[in-house]
Image (cartoon, rainbow, N blue to C red):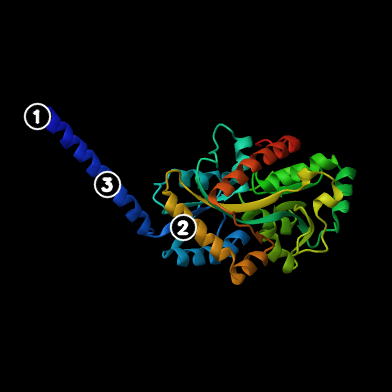
Amino acid sequence: MGKVACRRRRSALVLCALALVTQLAPASAQSWPARPIVLITPFPPGAGPDVHLRPLFARVAEHVGGTIVHEVRTGAGGTIALRQAMQATPDGHTLALLVNSNVIERYLRPDSSPDPLNLAHVSRIATGPGALMVASDSSVRRLEDLIADARRSPGKLNFGSSGPGTPSHLQAATLQALTGIETVHVPFRSTADVIPALIRGDVQFAFQGIAFAVPYARSGRLRVLATTGGQRSPQFPDVPALRELLPSELAVQENWAGVAFPVGTPTSIVRRMHAAIQSVLGEPAVRRSIENFGDLPAPSESPDAFAAFIRAENGKWREIVKLSRAGID
């Protein structure tokens, strides 16, 4: 009888523990957020994506009933920001801003780059092409002029990028591979360094995300020669898409941003954040804010759809890295 009673007591304790866990898990999700949510971002303050994403996240915070603070971690193609987010406690209070650089890094530094698939994915947010730019006082007026100059003087022109292996580097390296031109790569730490160097004439051309290009083109300090989307940008309808001049699908290179939590974050929190983003991206004021910088709102239908999108991006960027022969300088 003693053994039977013992077993019964143990069974009762196990059932009580399970009941307690079952009760606490929903309560924890329902009380979220219990403190400010930290969004870890690779974009420097004041940069184009930072400017147009802040209003979006302010509205998302209102939808989930909390606040979102931005923590900037630039460098290494977004790897520094992503690694820090992945190591955070999965309680719904740390959010990673994922960018296509995080996928690219897997093929440039496979031994040291975190895998963007190892996350609790929420949603893609926005997408936009890269923009090929020169200084406004440059004699180069069209992409054909740039290619002709580079062919006349191989190795004389140089281009600036936000760092080795970043989209700005790969887009220029792809241009070289598809046209056969030879130019010199000058890597900078970030876009915040590239743009002033381009305006000064320290570098002759550069690719950057269109959200970075729009304010400088509007102010007359830079000239956009081409964009890297599947079609012309609404912001620059008279500027050709690179694919119009270079008939290759690999000339189409869209930059994108999305968000994810660390693995282990409760599914209920992931779904609430996804619903909030879906709702906010449908608001006209938010859509205008994103479109004014040349990007387009691009919400994922579900967290699983965002994960599937990233898996597809892996194959695409693998081919682009191979074509461009862009290694780490």
Residue 36 is left or right of residue 211, and the answer is: left
Please indicate, yes or no, whether residue 94 appears anywhere in the rendered image: no
Say what amino acid the circle numbered 3 marks: Ala
Front disc: 2 or 1: 1
Q: Could you tell me the amino acid type at mark 2?
A: Arg
Q: Which badge, 1 or 3, comes first in the chain's sequence? A: 1
Residue at the (70%, 37%) spot, across then down: 321
**Numbered badge on residue 149:** none
Q: Which of 224 and 295 is in front in this view?
A: 295
Q: Distance between the residues labelled 2 and 1?
A: 49 Å
- According to the image, label 2 marks what residue? 272
Instruction: Answer yes or no: is residue 21 visible.
Output: yes
Q: Which mark is residue 2?
A: 1
Residue 190 horizontal/vertical position (percent):
61, 51
Looking at the picture, how far across and down is residue 324, in whole percent? Answer: 74, 38
Q: Mark 3 points at which residue?
A: 19
